């Protein structure tokens, strides 16, 4: 699952290849052949060094048939389907809503282009085209957010009725902090379908982040964020045991534990792939088809947030982006008057999870192998733009909606947290750097003094 394209700017290389590529040469090569300059018109064009493939994709050769280019065939089938649907009499019947069908056809056409023409991401299972389609869905969502950014809140609520006529109706906010006595009856009454959603969500986060400590920090940070924002969203008001027992110690821990165990299994699992032709027996062929939806290989993440200043900044920013991605749907459903289990909210959560899988893999490669990853990957760039655009939309629509000011103790808590976030890297990385700089300058001055004598 974490296999990379060999020529991709965010793809890994084998250790031996990396040593050969980035290790300094033993001697300085001379230009030309044996020191004799070679003019461009004297070069032998049949030599292999003259044939450079700028972007060779790593393919899953065990299913070679599905990796053959079929761009013209796909174009023909796509246009045939569009022509059939567009020319069918029941679609063109007067009085029918043709705008919805046209919008769906435009979306399908764009996703078809994405599957065929977008660049490959870091994953090749179940097929690179699947992850190209995920990138296309992310781009469509980002464009929809950009459109909504220029609309006022009332207009946006009316537009939502085009997707679901039952929307655009105010909903009462539900509070979970009405009876906070720690009794078995209250705990049992607080267990609902959202507990399962919590566990599944943290299972997905563990699969994305692949780090116990990161998941625990994010889990605790989200609970503090709920404490900080419950004056705006009533459903953030929960009992203390709901925050720390049901959420953190039960649901979040269970999902994180199962997710990390899955990561550990995939990390040590032996990967041996055979093509369908080499597989004999109906049961073996069926098992091979199902294994196509499992990772091709697996990479364990070691974020090492305290290893260097760059790693610290990357981990803190990733934590902030994940928190924003967690909080955004709560604000969007509150502003757009949607139930927590509305299909649009569920699709948004599932879509962000699928987009985050290749995005975090590309970010990890970008941070830990800067020599190979020359630029940030397309998945992480687009997902970052999507989360920030959601924040812009929420900030614009929130004007006049949340009138209660931020409590003073919350301001002090965030101020202290910000100071600690700045103070730690200053002591961990800044002070040692200043000491090394002063030591070098002192040694230089001593050296100059000895030379002057």
Image (cartoon, rainbow, N blue to C red):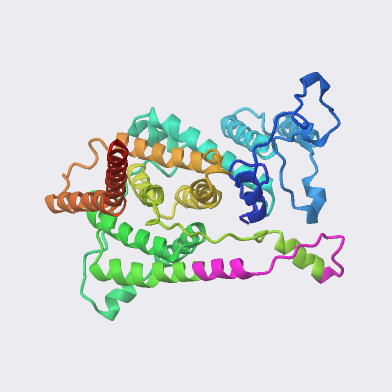
In percent of width and height, residue 171 lies at 32, 49
Report the number of numbered marks.
Answer: 0
In percent of width and height, residue 132 lies at 63, 42
Q: Residue 278's quadrant in the figure?
A: bottom right
Quarter of the image where the N terminus is located: bottom right
In the rendered structure, the answer to whether residue 46 lies left or right of residue 102 reads right
In the rendered image, the vertical position of residue 348 relative to residue 105, given as above or below: below
Quarter of the image where the C terminus is located: top left
In the rendered structure, the answer to whether residue 301 lies left or right of residue 198 reads right
Does the magenta run of residues contain 281?
A: yes
- From the viewer's side, name the closer residue of 152 and 435: 435
Does the magenta run of residues contain 251?
A: no
Q: Residue 27's quadrant in the figure?
A: top right
Q: Residue 108's quadrant in the figure?
A: top right
In the rendered image, the vertical position of residue 292 relative to residue 345, given as above or below: below
In percent of width and height, residue 334 lies at 33, 46
In percent of width and height, residue 439 lies at 29, 48
Report the magenta residues as a range.
260-283
In the rendered structure, the answer to whether residue 308 lies left or right of residue 442 reads right
Q: Of all residues shown, which one is farthest toward the front?
A: 453
Q: Of all residues shown, which one is farthest toward the left?
A: 408
Q: Is any atom of residue 334 visible in this view?
A: yes
Q: At 50% from the left edge and 39% from the top edge, which residue is drawn?
A: 382
- From the viewer's side, name the closer residue of 262 and 190: 262
Q: Is any atom of residue 163 visible in this view?
A: no
Q: At 47% from the left edge and 58% from the top edge, which residue is drawn?
A: 209
- From the viewer's side, name the closer residue of 284 and 380: 380
In the rendered structure, the answer to whether residue 416 lies left or right of residue 276 reads left
């Amino acid at each position: 699952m974490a296999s990379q394209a060999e020529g991709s700017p965010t793809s890994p290389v084998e250790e031996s290849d990396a040593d050969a590529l980035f290790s300094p040469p033993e001697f300085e090569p001379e230009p030309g052949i044996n020191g004799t300059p070679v003019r461009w018109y004297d070069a032998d064009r049949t030599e292999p060094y003259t044939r450079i493939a700028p972007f060779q994709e790593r393919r899953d050769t065990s299913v070679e048939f599905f990796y053959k280019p079929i761009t013209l065939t796909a174009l023909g089938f796509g246009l045939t389907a569009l022509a059939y649907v567009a020319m069918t009499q029941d679609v063109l019947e007067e009085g029918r809503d043709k705008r919805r069908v046209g919008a769906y056809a435009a979306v399908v056409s764009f996703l078809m282009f994405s599957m065929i023409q977008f660049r490959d991401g870091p994953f090749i299972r179940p097929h690179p085209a699947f992850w190209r389609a995920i990138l296309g869905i992310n781009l469509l969502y980002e464009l929809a957010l950009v459109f909504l950014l220029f609309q006022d809140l009332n207009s946006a609520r009316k537009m939502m009725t085009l997707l679901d006529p039952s929307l655009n109706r105010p909903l009462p906010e539900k509070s979970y902090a009405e009876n906070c006595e720690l009794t078995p009856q209250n705990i049992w009454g607080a267990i609902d379908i959202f507990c399962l959603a919590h566990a599944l969500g943290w299972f997905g986060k563990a699969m994305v982040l692949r780090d116990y400590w990161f998941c625990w920090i994010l889990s605790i940070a989200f609970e503090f964020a709920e404490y900080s924002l419950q004056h705006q969203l009533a459903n953030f008001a929960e009992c203390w045991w709901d925050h720390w027992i049901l959420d953190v110690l039960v649901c979040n821990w269970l999902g994180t534990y199962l997710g990390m165990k899955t990561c550990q299994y995939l990390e040590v699992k032996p990967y041996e792939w055979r093509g369908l032709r080499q597989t004999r027996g109906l049961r073996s062929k069926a098992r091979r088809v199902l294994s196509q939806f499992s990772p091709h290989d697996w990479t364990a993440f070691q974020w090492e947030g305290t290893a260097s200043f760059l790693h610290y900044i990357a981990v803190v920013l990733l934590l902030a982006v994940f928190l924003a991605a967690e909080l955004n749907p709560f604000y969007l459903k509150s502003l757009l008057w949607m139930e927590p289990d509305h299909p649009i909210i569920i699709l948004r959560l599932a879509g962000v999870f699928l987009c985050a899988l290749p995005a975090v893999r590309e970010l990890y490669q970008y941070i830990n192998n800067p020599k190979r990853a020359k630029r940030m990957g397309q998945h992480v760039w687009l997902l970052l733009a999507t989360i920030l655009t959601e924040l812009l939309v929420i900030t614009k629509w929130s004007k006049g909606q949340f009138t209660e000011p931020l409590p003073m103790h919350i301001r002090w808590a965030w101020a202290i947290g910000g100071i600690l976030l700045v103070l730690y890297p200053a002591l961990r990385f800044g002070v040692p750097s200043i000491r090394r700089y002063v030591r070098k300058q002192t040694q230089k001055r001593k050296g100059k003094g000895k030379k002057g004598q």
